[in-house]
Image: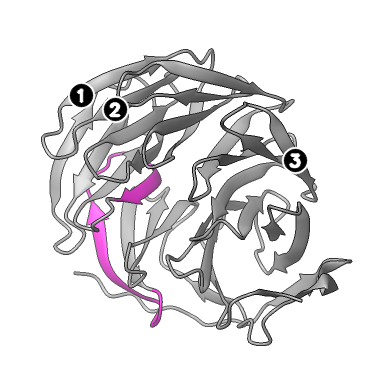
């Protein structure tokens, strides 16, 4: 077990014009910075309890942090190339990581032991996601496919083909009745994960699609693109409901909070933006990163937002109250 200290720094956040229609909490905490990785941190994710934060690094490690003390409680080593993403099973007993080494690794997050490596992709694996039951694991790869696995046995179940370019993101939604994949072919595809059938192709972005996220209902899907836009899609009709504009560069990652009332996006413009998806309004711009921001995640309670950047910094943005309409 490796223990790594962290440094607490102060940052700032700004209100967007028009955001006074909502009362933001008075206790938005200053930005705290977690340091430990060497180089880019590609992904961050909270455990289901919110007691742990996991980061995926270009230094080939997966790190497990205590978000309260900002100490690294465990470093998981085994990948031979940069780690691009990580995901917890719903019960928190499994942790999956994706890597440029073309594998997905499954770990016991409590002991740090690697349980198995899933092989089959022919290029780097960019994202991983568990379904709501924990019985399915999806992986997205630059080989243009999404693969479905049994996380308990490591057996490959199905390969989803349809994208004409690299697949950068994958997520389950709608109580796991839907699977969405984001691709550099500028499309999002919706799949039935049980049958492997392609259900819809969502088109509208004018550049690479980097990330996708469902709200809790599964009826609303958000996508982040290199065209600088966030799009919100109705998964029942395939229509784009809203286009959220504000980032001045590539939008790298997207995440809903626990009830879908808030949406966070990260960008190469070094900011994290907080949105109200129903109204399509930008609520705040969180500034403090000194490099392009690569990933963003809400804690299960919605009290914390974690973001990571190209310089290896992880920032925690804390909210101690609920956000209320006025």
Residue in view at x 31 percent, y 44 percent: 97
Q: Position of residue 129 (x, y in %)?
A: 36, 41
Which residue was labeled with disc 3?
Answer: 242
Q: Position of residue 13 (x, y in %)?
A: 73, 74
Q: Position of residue 185 (x, y in %)?
A: 60, 19
**Mark 2–mark 1 CB contact (< 8 Å):** yes
Which of the 4 image quadrants contains residue 51? bottom left
The residue furthest right is: 17
Q: Earlier in the sequence, mark 1 or mark 3?
A: 1
Q: Which residues are magenta?
A: 67-88
Instruction: Answer left or right for 301 relative to 77.
Output: right
- For the residues marked 2 and 1, what is the alpha-carbon distance in whole angstroms? 6 Å
Closer to the observer: label 1 or label 3?
A: 3
Which residue was labeled with disc 1?
Answer: 156
Q: Earlier in the sequence, mark 2 or mark 1?
A: 2
Find numbered disc 1 in the image and state the secondary structure of the residue it sits on.
strand
Q: Earlier in the sequence, mark 2 or mark 3?
A: 2
- In the foreground, 206 or 240: 240
Q: Evaluate whether residue 314 shows in this view.
A: no
Q: Is residue 251 magenta?
A: no
Q: Evaluate whether residue 141 shows in this view.
A: yes
Which residue was labeled with disc 2?
Answer: 148
Q: Residues within 10 Å of mark 1 (few under 14, many from 20)?
A: some
């Amino acid at each position: 077990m490796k223990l790594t200290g962290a440094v607490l720094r102060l940052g700032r956040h700004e209100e967007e014009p028009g955001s006074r229609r909502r009362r933001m909490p008075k206790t938005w905490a200053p930005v705290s910075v977690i340091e430990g990785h060497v180089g880019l941190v590609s992904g961050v994710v909270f455990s289901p309890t919110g007691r742990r934060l996991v980061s995926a690094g270009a230094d080939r490690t997966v790190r497990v942090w205590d978000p309260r003390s900002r100490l690294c409680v465990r470093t998981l080593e085994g990948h031979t190339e940069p780690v691009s993403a990580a995901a917890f099973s719903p019960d928190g007993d499994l942790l999956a990581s994706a890597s440029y080494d073309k594998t997905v690794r499954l770990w016991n997050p409590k002991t740090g032991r690697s349980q198995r490596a899933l092989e089959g992709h022919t290029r780097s694996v960019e994202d991983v996601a568990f379904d709501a039951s924990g019985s399915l694991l999806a992986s997205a790869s630059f080989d243009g496919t999404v693969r479905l696995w049994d996380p308990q046995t490591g057996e490959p179940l199905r390969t989803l083909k349809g994208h004409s370019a690299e697949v950068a993101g994958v997520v389950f939604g709608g109580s796991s009745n839907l699977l969405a994949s984001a691709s550099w072919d500028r499309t999002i595809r919706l799949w039935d994960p049980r049958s492997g059938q392609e259900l819809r192709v969502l088109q509208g972005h004018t550049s690479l699609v980097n990330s996708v996220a469902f709200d809790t209902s599964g009826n609303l899907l958000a996508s982040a693109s290199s065209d600088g836009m966030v799009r919100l899609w109705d998964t029942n009709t395939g229509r784009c409901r809203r286009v959220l504009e504000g980032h001045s560069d590539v939008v790298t990652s997207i995440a809903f909070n626990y009830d879908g009332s808030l949406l966070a996006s990260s960008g190469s413009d070094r900011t994290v933006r907080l949105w109200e998806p129903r109204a399509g309004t930008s609520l705040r711009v969180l500034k403090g990163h000194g490099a392009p921001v690569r990933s963003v995640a809400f804690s299960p309670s919605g009290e914390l937002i974690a973001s990571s950047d190209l310089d290896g910094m992880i920032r925690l943005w804390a909210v101690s109250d609920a956000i209320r309409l006025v």
